[in-house]
Every structure is written in structure tokens, then in C-alpha cells.
Amino acid sequence: MPSPTACRYSVSRILPSGTTATQNAFGIVPNLRTPYTEQWDFTVERHLGGFAIRLSYVGTHSVDLIYTRNLNQPMPSLIPFNQNRRPYPIFNTVTNYHSCAEQHSNGLQAIVAKNYGDGLTFNGGWTWAKDLTDAQDTETQFNLNNEWGNNQITPTHRVFGYLIYQLPFGAGRRYLNNNNRFVNGGLGRWQISWNLMWEWRQFFTPSFAGFDPSNTNVLGGRPNRVPGVSLYPTNGSAISQWFNPAAFAIPGCPLSTPVCTNPVAIGRHGDAGLGIIRGPNISNADLSVPKYSPIYESLRMEFRANFVNVFNHPNFTLPAANISAPATVEQITSTTPATFGTVGPRETDFQVRVEF
């Protein structure tokens, strides 16, 4: 991993001198590099007992990823913060875009597929992934290594599968194959498709608010990790108590009162890692029921009923993670919205389409 000092450069040529923070500045390093990804994999495939089996290892290494730094953030210190401690006192923040972040990912994949006759197709798989990066947070500009942690949007385990079944009724099928127009019109050419998915707990990071223990004018951030205290409740996670806030403390608070009202300015940031807690699992089952009806030789009509999250299984958002708010911390208060990439409540729609 590159040292942040290798990405540092002086902006004194463009910043005037002064003592009053009147504005913010934004910039991009002149030698900003284009991010790129290296990938390698190894795959073994075998046909066994009528099943097609594939086992794969996939590794990726992404370099020169873009991340932001506040070049006007002073070094953590026991000296109380004042504006003159900033490198450029006339500015508040000097946000700069750099290309020194990285990402390492290793994954195992197992896929099984099988066809039963001409009416049933099944495909399922499992993925295990370990994804680490330092491109997610920049609590301090001085040590990018402190930002190295679990990629919070990559689940460790993911199971998926789909099943397509053509019902065995009507012309050309096993049952009621008598070419009766009413039988074919009502029972023939129906198909059932299932799409199944389960993901194991995404990562998230606890926080605190309202205090500047590092004397850098950064209010809040990641807390301290309390040694020897479990991250999760003894009886397991629940909606009302997903993780154990006693495992964390506001920097500068005594261990006897980890969330105190007057922490000591200890001159450093919290030591809790990024993405060290797992959120709720996500699971989903979608059902599609299409039917094709021929009209002429080159013209057919399709009717389709789609059911997203057909069982209306609730998938919950991440819990409140601010330990400075004991009334709400560790609690989950809502389900995931129906947005791109997430699973919302059950949704049903019907479609009619003419194909020619």
C-alpha cells in the first residue's frame, strides 16, 4: 500500500496567507492517475452425476483509487485546536482528490447446474469474498493505513439460485397433449421461474458525535474499541439490540463511563476499525409466471405475472450506530426501501406483450 506522503504536495503557491477561515477550497492533484484493476482466476469444471459443477477462485487488485483528503487538517495533538494550527489558516477545509487508495479482493465461487428433461432447469451457487480497501473513509489525512478495512458493501457470503419449470400441460407436453384449442389456451405453455438470493450481513462502522478528542476540529468520528467486550449481545442480535454499544467508548472517556459528557482531549482519533460490525442478512425470492400464446406463425402474445419479494420477507436497514445517542443506538427502525440494488416490500405487476 502506498504511503500517503507519496501523494502529498504543496498548495502554498495558490493559497494566500491570513488568519481568518472564510471559505473552503477544492482541488485535484496535478498528477492524478487513472485507476485500474488487475484480475486473476483459476477454475475447475466437472460433469458429475448429471450435474455441471464449477469451482473458481477469483482475485482482484485495484490501485490508484480516488479518495479525498482535507489538506488543511492539523496533526492530532494535545494542544487545543485553534485556526493558526491549520497549514492554511485563511481557509476552513482544503479538500483534495488523490489517487493512492487500493482494494484487494479474494473470492471463492461454487456453481451447480442441471437440466431435468426439457422442462426443468436449475442453477445455484455460493460465493465467499474477502474484500479490503482504504478508499471508504478519510478520518485523518496523515495515515491512510488507518482507513484499511472491510469493504462495507461486499457481503462475505452470498447464495443464489434460479429455477425455470415449464408446466407439463398442453400441446407438445406430457399431459393433456390433445391439441384441444381450449385446453392449450387455458393450460398450455405456462412457465414458472424462481429467482432466489441470500446475503450474509453487510458491514458497518460505529461512530460518536459532538466531541473533538484529537484537537483537529473534527467533531465525532470512529470511537475507541473497548478491549475484551463482545461486539454483539450475549443472546444474539435482535432488532431492538443489534450490536453491543458497550464495546465502544468515546475517545477520552474513562472505561467506567465510556459515553461521558466531558471527554479529555487526548490528541488522537478513535482506534475502532472500519466495517467491524455486521448488519442484518438480506434474503429475497422473486417469482415470474409467463404464458405464451401463439396467434399466427410469426405472431404470439405473452402474458406475465411478476412478484418481487413474493413472500414479503422483511429486510432491515442497518442499526443506528452513534454511541453518543444511547436512546437509539443499536436499534433497527426500518426496512430497506425498494431502490436499485436493495430488496423492498412485495411488488406485483402484470404484463401483456405482443411479439412479432
Image: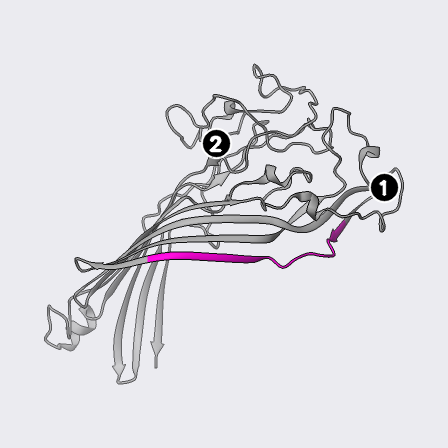
Q: Residue at x 53, y 49 (%)?
A: 103
Q: Position of residue 188 (x, y in %)?
A: 19, 70
Can the viewer see residue 259?
yes
Q: Is residue 2 magenta?
A: no
Q: Residue at x 65, y 43 (%)?
A: 3
The boundaries of the magenta stretch are: 26-43
Q: Is residue 256 above or below residue 151?
A: above
Direction from residue 85 to residue 291 in the image, left or right? left
Report the front residue among 283 and 202. Answer: 202
Q: Residue at x 62, y 19 (%)?
A: 253
Whichever of labels 2 and 1 marks the residue nearer the N terminus, that label is: 1
Q: CA distance from mark 2 to mark 1?
A: 42 Å
**What residue sits right under mark 2 in the picture?**
331
Report the front residue among 124 and 148. Answer: 148
Q: Residue at x 72, y 49 (%)?
A: 96
Can the viewer see residue 344?
no
Q: Is residue 281 above or below residue 243?
A: below
Q: Quadrant of the N terminus?
A: top right
**What residue sits right under mark 1 in the picture?**
90
